[in-house]
Image (spheres, grey):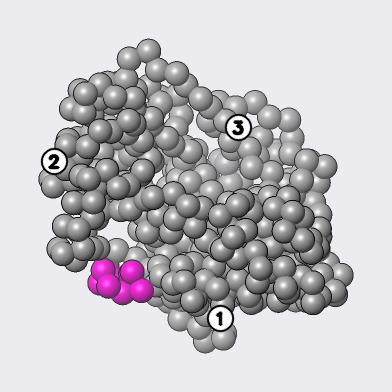
Amino acid sequence: MKDQVDALSGVGLRATYLNSSLSQEERRKRIERAAAGEFELVYAAPEGLEASVGQVLGRVNLSLIAVDEAHCISHWGHDFRPAYRNLAGLKQRFGNIPVLALTATATDEVTQDIIEQLGIKAPTLYRGSFFRSNLQLYSYAKGSRQPGSIKVPPVKEAIARLIADRPGESGIVYCLSRKSTEGLAQHLQNRGIKASAYHAGMEADERSRVQEAFSRDDIDVVVATIAFGMGIDKSNVRYVIHRDMPRSVEGYYQEIGRAGRDGVASDCILFYSWAEVIAYDRFAADAPSAVGERIRSQAREMFRFACEPGCRHQRLVGYFGDLLAACESSCDQCQPKNLFAVVAKSRGVPASRGAKGTRLVANVEHVELFGQLKALRRTIADEQGVPAFVVFSDATLLEMVTRHPTSESGLLDVPGIGPVKLERYGQAFLELLRRH
C-alpha cells in the first residue's frame, strides 16, 4: 500500500492508506481527513472494512470501490483469503456504487466466482492478454543435463551463479520452505551478495525491514516463501527465480509477474523436480478432500508445464484461455539458451523489449550514462524517503539514455515523465544529461 501511495503522490494524486502498520494517532488523523474528503484514493485491507475503516467510508461520498487481487475471494483461486469472502455485499453496503474487480490470474472458473461473490449484475468484462513478451522464461529440472551436455549445477550453486552474473540488479528467489529461504540467503551472503530471507515465521518488524530495504535497493535479493507476495509494486525487479516448483500455474504466473513491471526484459528461471509434487501431496493429505484433490491436481499441472516441450508462453497463456502463436524469442523452447553457458560474461545494461524485438543499451558511453542516471535517481529517492523506482523507472532511464534530451520539452517526450515529475525532478536530470 505504501509503495503505491508513494507512486501516486509522485504524480500529484491525493492518496493514503489505512492499515495496521500505522500508529493509533496517525490512523486517527488519516481517518478524519478521509471523512473530510481530502483524499482522492484510499487503500485499505479487506479486514479493515469490517472495522473502523468501513465505518468511516460509510460517511464518505464514494464513487467507486476497486477490489485488487480479486481472485482471493474465490475458493477456486490459488490464494483464497477468508477476509476477501466477507467483501460479498459491498455494492449494497455502499449504496450500489460501481465495483471494479482486478486480478492478473483468474481462470474462467475463478472469474465467474468473483462475479457471484461480489454480487455484480450484468458485469462488463475487460480482459487483456496474459502474454508479457519482456519476460524470458527458462525451466530446468534439478540435476539435469541440458542440450550441449552442460550439466546444471546443484540448485543452490546454480542460483548463486545466476545472481552473481547480475550484479546490482534486483531479484526475488522463491523457496518452498522457511528453512530453505534462510539457508539460501546465508549462502548468497557468504558469496558477497546483498540478500535477505523473508517468511511468515519472522517478526513483523523484521519482515517490514527486509521489504523496505529491497524497495529502496539497499539489498539486491529477497529469498522468500510466497509470504513475500501481494503488493510488491517494485517496477525494476530484473529476475524471479523459483528454487522449488510453485504449487500451481496460477501461483507461478502471479510470482513471475513481479518481474519486469517497467517493461524492461527480465528473466524468470524455474527449477523443478518430482519431489516437489510429492511435497504438495503431503500438504493435500491434511486438507479437506475437495481442497486436497485440487492441490494434487494443480501440482501435476504445474509439473507438466515445467517439463513438457513447446513454447512456454503459448502454454502459459493457454492455461488462462488465451490463444497465442509461439513467442519465437522469449522462452528457452523457442530460443534455446543455457544460462549456465553464458554466466560470467559482462551483461551490460538491461534490455528494453519493443514490438520488433530486444534493444540493448550496450556501448560503453551508454552504460556510463545509465549508471550516472541511476545514482542521481537514488540520491533524490533517499532525500525524499521513497523507493528509487517511484522517481523514475528503469525503462524511463533507458529512454533518457537513448534519446538524450537536453531541453524540458525533450524530457517531457520521454515515456514516464509528465508535468508533475518534470517540475520535481526535471532540472536535476537535465543538468546531468547536458554535462554528459
- Point out the tag, 2 or 3, that comes first from the N-terminus: 2
First to last magenta residue range: 201-209
Pinpoint residue 83: horizontal percent, then vertical percent: 21, 42
Depth check, mark 3 against mark 1: the one in front is 3
Q: Is 260 included in the stretch rendered in magenta?
A: no
Instruction: Look at the numbered disc 1 and give the secondary structure of its residue.
Output: loop
Residue drawn 29% across the image and 63% down it = 200
Disc 2: which residue? 55
Alpha-carbon distance for marks 2 and 3?
A: 38 Å
Decide: is 335 above or below 396.
above
Residue drawn 53% across the image and 27% down it = 127
Mark 3 crowdedness (10 Å alpha carbons): few <14, some 14-19, many ≥20? few
Q: Nearer the viewer, residue 254 or 88?
A: 88
Left or right position of 379 against 266: left
Left or right position of 155 against 405: left
Depth check, mark 2 against mark 3: the one in front is 2
Left or right position of 311 against 298: right
Occupied quadrant, residue 145: bottom right
Alpha-carbon distance for marks 2 and 1?
A: 47 Å
Mark 2 crowdedness (10 Å alpha carbons): few <14, some 14-19, many ≥20? some
Residue drawn 52% across the image and 80% down it = 194
Pinpoint residue 260: horizontal percent, then vertical percent: 61, 54
Q: Amino acid at mark 2?
A: Gln
Depth check, mark 2 against mark 1: the one in front is 2
Q: Is 206 included in the stretch rendered in magenta?
A: yes
Q: Amino acid at mark 1?
A: Ile
Pinpoint residue 297: horizontal percent, then vertical percent: 41, 36
- Point out the tag, 2 or 1, that comes first from the N-terminus: 2
Disc 3: which residue? 129
